[in-house]
């Protein structure tokens, strides 16, 4: 995995992403607990959410309401939430030299509304860079899992996006794998990416995540 500084701050920015059912939220909590046990100052957030504005927008894009939200409007709502998250939470924490761990980030929009939703990945990437003020992660860990395994884990769909049919969910997974398959750096998400096999035992998944994070932290300190 090649390493590039994806932002101009002294801190380290880590993102867990991937198809629903990969265990991102659980593994993010474990990662935060481990990082804090090493004495690091860690800020954790979820995307969308993490701010007053973000928490108000989150139910709009997730709730099963009858309000019609087109794919482009959906993408822009996520971007608005992220813009506030970066300005209010992520950028200040990185500027202070801390570690930020986020449950999802820009690549999710590129995949969910782009690859699976029919919008252009490159356009979403450009809008996303503007919304995020150019702040990209030092590492995005993609917790990859087959659709049928994910569905068995999740059970009944929990929100409007998970309600979408299996062919949409298959495109989501394909989108994450396509980003991994791009020549580094990915043209529409120019930040380091690594695949984590999330179909394994949770402890094995965490050990793989920890190994990748140790490597990135060492590179940040040495760079």
Image (spheres, rainbow, N blue to C red):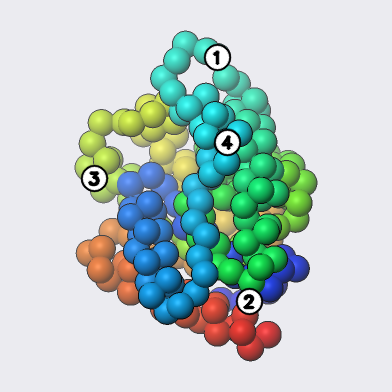
Circle 3: element type? helix
Say whether marks 1 and 3 touch (CB < 8 Å): no
Say whether marks 4 and 1 touch (CB < 8 Å): no
Kindly identify the residue that appears in the image at 68 percent across and 85 percent down: 223
Residue behind mark 2 = 3
Residue behind mark 3 = 153
Query: Which tag, 1 or 2, sits closer to the chain's start?
Result: 2
Asked if residue 78 can be seen in this view, the reply is: no
Quarter placement of the N terminus: bottom right
Total numbered labels placed on residues in the image: 4
Residue behind mark 4 = 52
Left or right of residue 137, residue 132 in this image:
right
Residue 221 position, x and y percent, is 61, 84
Is 90 in front, or is 96?
Answer: 96
Kindly report the distance in space between the C-alpha atoms of the residues bearing marks 4 and 3: 31 Å
Kindly identify the residue that appears in the image at 25 percent across and 31 percent down: 156
Left or right of residue 19, residue 80 in this image:
right
Task: For label 3, count other residues whose C-alpha is less than 10 Å away and answer few (under 14), some (14-19) or many (20+).
Answer: few
Residue behind mark 1 = 68
Left or right of residue 118, residue 201 in this image:
left
Circle 1: element type? loop
**Looking at the picture, does residue 181 appear above or below residue 61?**
below
């Amino acid at each position: 995995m090649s390493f590039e500084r994806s932002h101009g701050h002294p801190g380290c920015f880590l993102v867990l992403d991937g198809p629903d059912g990969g265990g991102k939220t659980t593994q993010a909590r474990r990662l935060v607990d481990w990082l804090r046990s090493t004495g690091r100052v860690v800020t954790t957030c979820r995307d969308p959410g993490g701010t007053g504005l973000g928490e108000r927008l989150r139910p709009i894009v997730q709730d099963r309401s009858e309000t019609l939200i087109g794919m482009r409007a959906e993408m822009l709502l996520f971007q608005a939430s992220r813009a506030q998250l970066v300005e209010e939470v992520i950028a200040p924490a990185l500027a202070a030299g801390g570690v930020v761990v986020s449950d999802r980030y820009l690549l999710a929009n590129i995949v969910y509304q782009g690859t699976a939703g029919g919008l252009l990945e490159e356009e979403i990437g450009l809008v996303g860079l503007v919304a995020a003020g150019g702040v990209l992660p030092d590492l995005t860990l993609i917790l990859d899992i087959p659709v049928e395994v994910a569905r068995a884990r999740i059970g009944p769909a929990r929100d409007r996006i998970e309600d979408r049919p299996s062919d949409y969910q298959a495109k989501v997974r394909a989108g994450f794998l396509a980003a991994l398959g791009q020549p580094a750096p990915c043209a529409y998400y120019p930040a380091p990416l690594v695949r984590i096999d999330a179909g394994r035992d949770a402890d094995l998944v965490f050990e793989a995540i920890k190994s990748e994070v140790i490597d990135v932290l060492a590179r940040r300190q040495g760079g």
